[in-house]
Image (cartoon, rainbow, N blue to C red):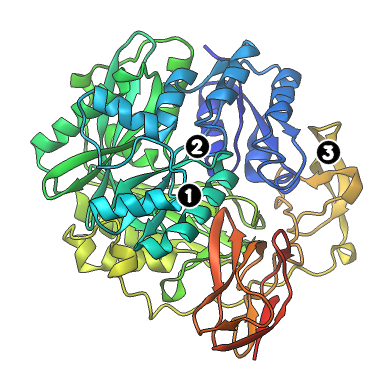
Amino acid sequence: MLTKVLIANRGEIAVRIIRTCRELSIATVAVYSDVDRTALHVRLADEAYALGGDSAADSYLNTPKILDAIRRSGADAVHPGYGFFSENADFARAVMAEGVAWIGPPPEAIEIMGDKISSRRAAERAEVAGVPGTNTVTASPDEVTAFGDQHGWPVVIKAAYGGGGRGMRVVESAADAPAALESAERESLKSFGRSESYLERYLPWPRHIEVQVFADARGHCIYLGTRDCSAQRRHQKLIEEAPAPEIPAEIETAMGEAAVKVALACGYVNAGTVEFLYQDGEFYFLEMNTRLQVEHPVTEAVTGLDLVALQLKVASGERLPLAQEDVERRGHSIEVRINAEDPAGGRFVPSPGTITRFRRADGFGVRTDAGYDEGDTVSQFYDNLVAKLIVWGGDREEARRRMLRALRETEIEGIPTTIPADIAILEHPDFVAVRHATAWVEQRLDLSALAPTGPPAPPPGDAEQSPLVEREVDAEVNGRRYRVKLWVPDVTTAVTAGATGVAAGGGRGTARPRPAASASASRAMAPSGGGSVTVPMQGTIVQVLVSVGDTVEAGQAVCVLEAMKMENHISAERSGTVTQVNVAPGDSVGAGDVVAVIE
């Protein structure tokens, strides 16, 4: 069995893995960027090593730094979580070259299935039909136009080396092709380190159905059931449930068997998810995610299996402890992703900031998986997932009612979240009757009544005025964290010691200190108006679309802002002539900053 696991990730999934490892008496090693020095996953791990930097490229996507942490910690295994390096064959090979176990599929399987183009080819070899599309890298907008003219508009551009909706664009017409392809490639490069894309026919009203598969190194592969992930915005999931409702048993069985065929076709090992689009009684292979999915807890809830524990067993060389006929499902489970976004008006604006209050739901059949705690700051540099709320019920309706109760019981202050939108989805008759599809949230769900969330709370006052008390804190020395005792101000927010790298921890029987909010993170989300075009969130300008002297129309995009790994178009609210452009690509901006002036 493994003895020490380094988690090459952050946030909720790192916390999730740490907890299962602790139950199995496996030591854990966290890695962290400068932004995450006091993050929850760092506080919970047995050891933690600094990667430095703020962006993913400087930290969680920096192979030499992570390999150095593996060597220094003596870890005998690496779990990549999801995102970042989880589907990177080169990173997996680099880990294995260190003599360390990789808790995931073989690099060869990652290459086949991590590249969505080659995964389509593998599915064809396994005689599993896919969505009509291309099996080559899209080289130019002309190819998008040709594909659309042949198969009909709209079409979908997809990242060949990604997932989760990153680098995905729906193209309505040939005129939109150049900008859509450029945007898709840019977002894919930032999220996954690769910019290649391919094309698919756009299905107008499909449901997104997943099948969880598991395989061991002895060629034994099973499926654990289906999940429905059709409630989405920006091609990213908001609500997932297991099993997928309103699918005939024979079709569900056919999906499971097809998923196993796809997995076996690429020599798969460990946990994986085969995704399908389901429409009019037919299902089409979409892609295979060669990792643990964000939504895996709903499968755990209905099967009673800890999927991370299974991952660790398989990575240790053990045989899967159950056969297909041993898989039993009971009841229904729903998961809601709680993201740091303001859903007012259906815009889902990314909203980083400091969580000033976090009260988790409780009760029978309720589980919260969170990557943050009260006092933690959600950074603009990473994914905006704050927590996942998972419930179980005897049937779908019981689970739906339980989720509504749990959502209303959950209190998060300091940042806006998607909870109001989640409630609106769960209460809607279309969701209740399973009439929704992947485009339903954006095309038919009316969120116009949701009011914008007010500005986040200001940072706490001067901590130096508080009395001193003895606390255990974490000190970083040469990139490794140690627990020490210091006299610090008696406040509920953390005090960091600047250049010394001292960060707050928590003493026994006392409230654990937390980091104070940065000035940029706590700025109010000022709405744009009049002739000044302002940004509603902090982030980085990736493209400026106008110049001084240009004539623009109301609603026309002025620039593209990247925040929380998503691109957002900042638009003019009035027609006129651009008289000022205050930003350039690469500039960092804060909420309320004026990027352009129109007169």
Would you name the residue on which mark 2 appears? 82
Task: Determine whether, in the image, residue 167 is placed left or right of residue 78.
Answer: left
Q: Position of residue 402 (x, y in %)?
A: 30, 56
Sequence-wise, which precedes: disc 3 or disc 2?
2
Residue at point 25%, 68% (across, down): 428
Determine the secondary structure under disc 1. Answer: loop
> Compared with residue 183, is residue 275 higher up or lower down, i.e. above or below?
above
Q: Position of residue 549 (x, y in %)?
A: 67, 83
Q: Which of marks 3 and 1 is in front?
A: 1
Residue at point 59%, 39% (across, down): 193
Task: Determine whether, in the image, residue 55 is placed left or right of residue 500.
Answer: left
Sequence-wise, which precedes: disc 3 or disc 1?
1
Sequence-wise, which precedes: disc 2 or disc 1?
2
Q: Quadrant of residue 544?
A: bottom right
Q: Residues within 10 Å of mark 3 (few under 14, many from 20)?
A: many
* Numbered tag placed on residue 475 in the rendering: 3
**Is residue 279 among the parts visible in the rendering?**
yes
Q: Quadrant of residue 300?
A: top left
